[in-house]
Image (tube, rainbow, N blue to C red):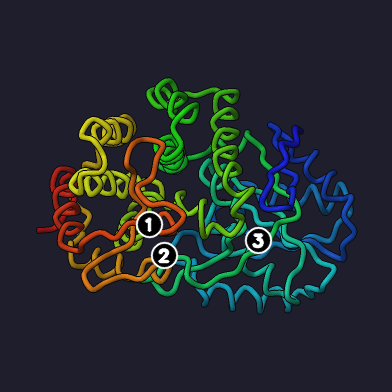
């Protein structure tokens, strides 16, 4: 396995990448003293990978391994799941010497990461992400959080460093297209906010991403990690420079919550990016040419012909008003703070404004309706 070493603030986190390497990962874990290892996973990944990996730890390496399961999906990413799971951890004898290993996508990683930070004020956390999005994006952040009901995303949480992160590229072979696509949308976001190699890579990758070989997927993952690391080195809590990774997320998070699981995180962010670009163009920041570049990149992988999803503008705006960036800067009535681009690779805001720009609510409403009407998914 290759160790690409993720730098977050002053900490360096081992990030081990291999292919078909469950045995190697288990061997690495066996070097850590522990009384037991808890694999935290969801109902789908349990049957795909968790049972197999637990058997390797138990049988091959003699490690007392216990599986704790949460329900699959964003709808279960909440405080109720955290409390229910914590009760199971104590039922099975968790101690300060235990290790919590998350095995699954971003929802599992975020929820398990929060639980690890709470148990005894913090037990060792290891991540084993199994989706493209979680591999290059969610586990590279030390933000561990769940949602408040289905109205406020990632608002109950902590900052907590994992001990190590593992990736087995082989798991991507069983990834459904919508999950693969979800991770690709975040790569598009990186290309738009950073430009350079991150943007250049997309033009070759996007048309063929469904058929990409392991070497190409590994390159995509490393570029994604490099993107996050470039700013997490100086802003590990993602409250200043690294907040630009929230591009497209103000509207995207609202879409994700409103769709109640019908759209993935990445698909929702893709629409959020389209909306942010249109807002910036309407506010005379982003050129029409750069706005079209946004749309062309996103349309290479999705046309959003999803007319059966019952969104409404009012519903989305209500959710946007509860965005988790609320409170970073003073907002006047009728304005929403958003990450906007002046051009590809350059934000409108700067360090003085926390890289946020105030957007008039009426202009945002018009932009949402225009984007969603064009994509045939807004309930009129």
**Are the residues flagged by discs 2 and 1 in contact, CB closer than 8 Å?**
yes
Q: Residue at x 40, y 42 (%)?
A: 178
Sequence order check: which comes first, mark 3 or mark 2? 3
Q: In 3D space, how far apart are the residues under numbered discs 2 and 1 (Cα atoms)?
A: 9 Å
The residue that mark 1 highlights is: 356
Q: In 3D space, how far apart are the residues under numbered discs 3 and 2 (Cα atoms)?
A: 29 Å
Q: Which mark is residue 63?
A: none
Task: Count the marks.
Answer: 3
The residue that mark 2 highlights is: 325
Q: Is residue 257 left or right of residue 316?
A: right
Sequence order check: which comes first, mark 3 or mark 1? 3
Q: In the image, residue 159 lies at what x, y percent? A: 62, 65
The residue that mark 3 highlights is: 40
Q: Secondary structure at mark 2?
A: loop
Q: Is residue 48 left or right of residue 209?
A: right
Q: In the image, residue 82 lies at what x, y percent? A: 58, 73
């Amino acid at each position: 396995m290759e160790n690409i070493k993720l730098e977050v603030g002053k900490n360096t986190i081992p990030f081990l990448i291999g292919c078909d390497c469950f045995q190697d990962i288990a061997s690495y874990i066996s070097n850590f003293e522990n009384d037991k290892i808890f694999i935290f996973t969801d109902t789908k990944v349990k049957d795909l990978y968790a049972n197999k990996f637990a058997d390797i730890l138990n049988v091959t390496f003699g490690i007392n391994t216990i599986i704790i399961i949460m329900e699959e999906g964003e709808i279960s990413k909440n405080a109720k799941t955290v409390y229910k799971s914590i009760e199971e951890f104590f039922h099975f004898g968790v101690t300060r010497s235990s290790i919590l290993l998350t095995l699954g996508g971003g929802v599992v990683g975020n929820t398990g990461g929060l639980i690890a930070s709470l148990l005894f004020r913090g037990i060792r956390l290891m991540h084993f992400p199994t989706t493209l999005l979680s591999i290059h994006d969610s586990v590279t952040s030390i933000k561990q959080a769940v949602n408040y009901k289905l109205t406020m995303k990632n608002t109950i949480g902590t900052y907590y460093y994992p001990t190590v992160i593992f990736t087995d590229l082989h798991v991507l072979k069983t990834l459904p297209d919508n999950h693969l696509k979800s991770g690709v949308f975040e790569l598009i976001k990186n290309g738009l906010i950073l430009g350079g190699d991150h943007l250049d890579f997309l033009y070759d990758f996007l048309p063929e991403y469904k058929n990409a070989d392991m070497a190409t997927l590994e390159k995509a993952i490393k570029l994604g990690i490099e993107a996050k690391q470039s700013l997490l080195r100086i802003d590990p809590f993602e409250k200043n420079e690294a907040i630009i990774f929230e591009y497209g997320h103000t509207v995207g998070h609202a879409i994700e919550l409103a769709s109640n699981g019908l759209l993935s995180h990445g698909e929702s962010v893709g629409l959020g990016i389209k909306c942010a670009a249109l807002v910036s163009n309407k506010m005379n920041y982003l050129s029409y040419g750069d706005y079209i570049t946004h749309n062309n990149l996103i349309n290479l992988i999705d046309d959003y012909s999803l007319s059966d999803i019952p969104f409404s503008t009012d519903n989305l705006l209500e959710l946007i008003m509860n965005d988790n960036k609320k409170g970073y800067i003073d907002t006047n009535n009728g304005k929403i703070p958003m990450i906007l681009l002046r051009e590809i690779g350059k934000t409108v805001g700067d360090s003085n404004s926390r890289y946020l720009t105030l957007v008039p609510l009426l202009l945002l409403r018009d932009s949402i309706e225009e984007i969603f009407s064009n994509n045939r998914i807004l309930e009129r």
